Amino acid sequence: MSETLSQLWTDIQRVLNYPIKLGESQLTLSSLIKLLVLLALVLIAARYLRRLLRRRVLARTHLEPDLQFAISRFAGYCFIMVGFFIVLKVIGLDLSSLAVIAGAIGIGIGFGLQSVVGNLVSGLIILAERPIAIGHRIEVGGVAGQVTKINLRSTTVVTNDNITIIVPNSDFITHAVTNWSHGDPKVRLRLPVGVAYGTDVEELQRVLLEVASENPATLKEPAPGVRFLGFGDSSLDFELAVWTIEMAHKPTRFRSELYFAIERKLRENNIEIPFPQRDLHLRSGKIVLEPRTGGRLEAGLQPD
């Protein structure tokens, strides 16, 4: 029995010490396992370092939360790079011998991962210039919601329906971004309103301003206003402009509340919202139906 165990242990050692040639360096299976364990420990330590730096050090400063998050992320990435380099040295891997292989692999990866690299560079630009930050309400590429996390490759946006959307960072660099929270949160909302021809425009102006004043989310200063946009095909076109800070929090609900109030006020004051209409003028004459080929009838207008 002891001889069997001894032979088994000898076989295991032979497998663990089997040389693996890598460039000018030589690794064994045991050193490769040690390498993987040390790399995993570096990743765990980097995560703990980020959390410790953010909660114990940066939390005591006067920096904004999004900047604290960016600094902790950058410090974590630097720690991982240095940790990987030290681990490779400890294992005894000659990095200089891998330069040619790494260069060839890097070129192949560069062609295959252009979009990934672009997102990484865009992430660094976002963290440096800070056009968006955690907690901002943004709209980009048809996606609207609140920014909850900014990573190097992508940004997490949560919509009002509590749907999490992962947006590539390159979209924030190559597309126009609407940031409702950047700078002054006070913005002006314009609501188009069309009424029937013959409506008392002074009465309409009073009603629309009354709607604006009754909504607690509209600001008194700057004051709301009503503008006459022009004469439409079927309606007189007006615009109610109100200032608010709700566009950064609940834009759809705020717009809906105003439209509900406008419809109710127009109905109470007998102000008509017209349907699209066309006037058809017929000159005097009579309509004659004449048979055509195929058994179909064709209408024609003949003068008296």
Image (cartoon, helix red, strand yellow):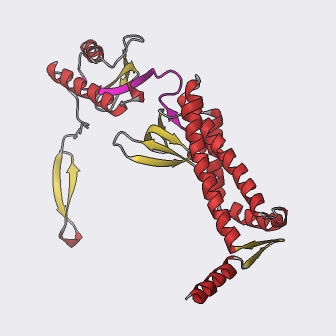
Instruction: Judge whether 140 appears above or below 232 on screen.
Output: below
Please state if 271 lies on the left or on the right of 152 as rendered.
left
Q: Position of residue 171 (x, y in %)?
A: 56, 46
Instruction: Judge whether 148 appears above or below 26 on screen.
Output: above
Please state if 175 lies on the left or on the right of 295 as rendered.
right
Image quarter in which the N terminus is found: bottom right
Q: Which residues are magenta?
A: 177-197
Q: Residue at x 39, y 41 (%)?
A: 159
Q: Residue at x 16, y 58 (%)?
A: 289
Please state if 1 lies on the left or on the right of 242 as rendered.
right
Q: Position of residue 114 (x, y in %)?
A: 66, 57
Q: Position of residue 207 (x, y in %)?
A: 24, 15
- Residue 66 visible (yes or no): no
Viewer-proximal residue, 109 or 204? 109
- Residue 15 visible (yes or no): yes
Image quarter in which the C terminus is found: top left
Viewer-proximal residue, 41 or 107? 41
Q: Position of residue 170 (x, y in %)?
A: 59, 47
Viewer-proximal residue, 201 or 192? 192
Image quadrant in which you'd find residue 116: bottom right
Viewer-proximal residue, 148 or 169? 148
| Figure disc tally | 0
Q: Is residue 183 magenta?
A: yes
Image quadrant in which you'd find residue 69: top right
Q: Residue at x 72, y 74 (%)?
A: 28
Q: Residue furthest front?
A: 2
